[in-house]
Image (cartoon, rainbow, N blue to C red):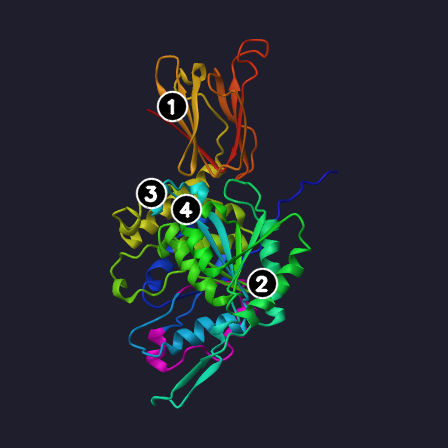
Amino acid sequence: MGSKKETQKPATKRIAVIPGDGIGQEVIPQAVKVIQASGAPVEMVEFDWGADRYLRDGITVPPDGFAMLSREFDAILVGAFGDPRIKTNIHAKEILLGMRFKMDLYANVRPVRLLDAALCPLKGVEPKDVDFVVVRENTEGVYTDAGGVFKQGTPDEIATQEDINTRKGVERIIRYAFEYCRSHTKLDGSPRNKVLMCDKSNAMTHAGGLWQRVFKEVRSEYPQITPQHMYVDALCMQMVRDPRQFDVVVTNNMFGDIITDLAAGLQGGLGMAASGNIHPGKTSMFEPVHGSAPPIAGKNVANPFGAILTAAMMLRHLRFTKEADKIETAVLEAVRRKMSTQDVGGSLGTRETGDFVARAVSQLSLQTAAKFKAYVGDPDFHDGAIVQVRRESHELVVEIEGYSGAHYSVRFSGVKSVKSHRPEGMVLYALSEMEDEAPSRSFHFANSRQPDEEGGDSVLEITAQNCSVERR
């Protein structure tokens, strides 16, 4: 007697949520709302660590706080820290830097992706041109607060700030960058194949010399990846001049902090930027790049996309790939339709933007449940012909003219691959989905011509996350 094979559900993951201060308390609830809409099997527990609690009881991190996070949670979603009521920002230092250092979250990973050409201040730059990743060493450098002040307040005052670079720290972050390059693709599905190490070894000879030696040794283990090097000042210039040339950039703590803010400007500002603080195999922390922004806190104007994309990055890290894909697709749709805050061209508030993305994610979930199988649509669609296949922002668009003159735009988002042979002029029979499992869905334009007829060898197959058909 046969038995039915049961599909195992993914294990529920536990996420600690720490909104923090300022706009963190506004954008993180939107990210939580979107995670819930995605259907990801997670349990979220909120903690009130931040300025309000510190002012109330003097506690920054409870005893055993970091050990508890490592022991009881799979990931941490953080908002922002910083409050003008606390001049020293001691709570921010003890919570955020404490989390990075004491939990040894040594890899700060910041994807730099342009979702829409209108968001980039550079002329003629399209989404495909800005798709690189900065890997920043996260536990050493000048952020260790090593140094001191001698004869403070006198004309002879001396201040020293030590830049700490260990062989262990440098080697593991460089190796992480090469491994990331080897195992991650770009948004269009093409492989990453370049790792650029950024330093200032012509001036910082001791620290830079260590980075140079280690980079040379590690790169020899990855012959399939092209190693590159730039000084940090040259990198900043080239990033603005031509961002197309970058793939994976690895650098130290301070330079990584600086160049990722510049990079965020290429993708629409700090409000669009996500990041992860990662130690492979251990509980890792994810936070949007922006700060607490006290001047706009509480006004419902902060951009929640950075927090929402950070949530997607966290879900992908937890191997909830489908849910992460849905969130990223929904944000792309929101940007394209300008259902966003004013800083990126919309007119919505923080909450309203989060609501739109959550609804879009819910709709994508429903679409996944009832999968697209075939489209003949209006009666003349299946007797129409493909007029043009073109790129439009982050989408691939197939323009079709029906036999009666009606026009259709078939839009594909999250395109992974395209198989194409003389598609223009192809006379259609149908558009159908060949695979069941999202997000790797293969859409096939069936040709109504026979193989021995003119145009009968035309082919157009597109692997993408989602497809929609509009009649114009």
Q: Amino acid at mark 1?
A: Tyr
> Which class describes the residues within 10 Å of circle 1: few (<14), some (14-19), or many (20+)?
many
Looking at marks 1 and 2 on the same chain, the residue that comes earlier in the sequence is marked by 2
User: Label 1 to label 3, Cα distance in Å?
Assistant: 25 Å
Mark whose residue sits in front, 1 or 2 = 2
Read off the residue under disc 1: 408
Quarter of image, res 89: bottom left
* Residue drawn at x 49%, y 50% as measured from the top left: 132
**Is residue 318 visible in this depiction of the protein?**
no
Read off the residue under disc 3: 118
Quarter of image, res 201: bottom right
* Residue drawn at x 26%, y 62% as measured from the top left: 296
Read off the residue under disc 4: 114
Numbered label tally: 4
**Magenta-highlighted residues:** 51-79
Mark whose residue sits in front, 1 or 3 = 3
Q: Can you say whether 436 is above or below 306 in the image?
A: above
